[in-house]
Amino acid sequence: MAQLSVAAPPNEREEAFVLARSLPPPGPMPGRFWKIDLAKLALEELTPGSATPQFELSEEAKRKGVVACDLASARAAHAAIISATEGNVADWRSGRFTALNVARRENGAFIFLPKGAVVDEPIVVSYDLEGPAAFPYVLVAASEGARATIITRFRCGSNLELVSEIVEIVALEHAAVTYATVQDFGPRVRAFWSRRGNIGRDAELHWALAELGAELSIGDVKSTTLESGARTTISGFFFPNKGQHVDVQSEADHPAGQTQSETLFKSAAIDGGQARYIGNIRIRPAAHGVDATLRDDALLLSKDSHIDSIPALEIGANDVKAYHGATIGAIDDEVLFYAMSRGIERHEAERMIALGFFEPALVRFPTEALRDELRRALAGKIV
């Protein structure tokens, strides 16, 4: 049987490409710290390569009816689910590179969790990306009462220059999804990503995001608590070093009352690394009883590094609990003195303190093996 295409209809692809060429680029304007002018980069002109997903799915999960496959293969058997979810969580018309993903994407990854399916072992999606440009897409549909952890990894070819990624997750009533992703692209890559989740009644969605590689990484993550009892955590970290720019935006959107969110980001910069984080909690006028927090901490490990932190609250209802806080600074002298007074050499003390700084975010990632891998990657940035 010939493989079905998942490309958007011709008229939609054409509209998406026109938008990709006309919408303003994301990220800050060039200035003292932000050196890259995206308006001058014709990234949408790069020749599309390939984005091929591979899956690790336990036999237990298969027996429970869990589906993890490429989106093209899933079209026939799960047409109704895909039609109801694909493109309905992430607004691809809102940004240049989400539009470019729709215009250029040929396939994607599809994960379906049937009603009541509880999966203990993580579902791993490994994307093989070949350049010059790759357009990965992940669609997760979690039915009522389903629970699973999904880990997305990337392997990129040497000629990769651009990655434009979209993730869409739907968690229906009483479902629970943990979605972790690790971005460790090579130094020539410019990565743009948009990750979105809709959360139903008494359901949960937990994000864990690690931005480690790429010359430039610009992306946004958003959880929307659509019904009472919905809960979400948005956690992550980034650590730009020499030649790296990172721009991350997060939003916990609460259109429904009696919902909860917790956002936590940890970031550091060293050897001229540049970054910006914008975090927002949005509580709609009818969303009474919301409990939402946001915490962002940034650590500057060299004088030529820079991180902007912009936390925000939009509160339209009265009976809510909402908090945000942010810190930016260098390693505390008293903490450093204490470590050195115990016989630890200064550089090793700074390294130990910096790595410990990330732990509150690291513990949000699933599996000890993944957490250890991330610790090693962070340690590699402090030489």
Image: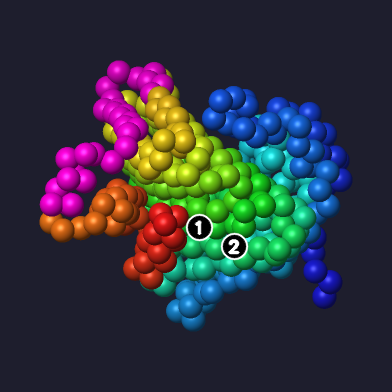
Task: Identify the mark at residue 133; answer none if there is no mark.
Answer: none
Q: The N terminus lies in which quarter of the figure?
A: bottom right
Q: What secondary structure is found at the residue carrying circle 2?
A: strand
Between 110 and 217, the one lying in front of the other is: 217
Q: Mark 1 vs mark 2: which is more N-terminal?
A: 2
| Residue 382 image-quadrant placement | bottom left
Placement of 289 over or under 168, stated as above or below: above
In the rendered image, which quarter is residue 96 located in? top right
Q: On screen, 65 above or below 29? A: below
* Residue count near mark 1 (Cα–Cα under 10 Å), binned few <14, some 14–19, many ≥20: some
What residue is shown with label 1? 182
Q: Amino acid at mark 2?
A: Phe
Q: Is residue 271 above or below residue 258?
A: below
Q: Which residue, given by chain and number where applicable, does mark 2 sit on?
A: 154
Q: Is residue 359 left or right of residue 282?
A: left
Q: Residue at x 85, y 40 (%)?
A: 14
What kind of residue is marked 1?
Answer: Val
Residue 85 seen in this snapshot: no
The percent position of residue 298, horizontal first and vertical second, equals 37, 38
Residue at image coords 71%, 63%: 158
Taking depth in this image into account, of 326 and 127 the one nearest to the observer is 326
Residue 11 within the magenta-colored segment of the rendering: no
The quadrant the C terminus occupies is bottom left
Q: Are marks 1 and 2 in contact (CB under 8 Å)?
A: yes
Residue range highlighted in magenta: 313-341
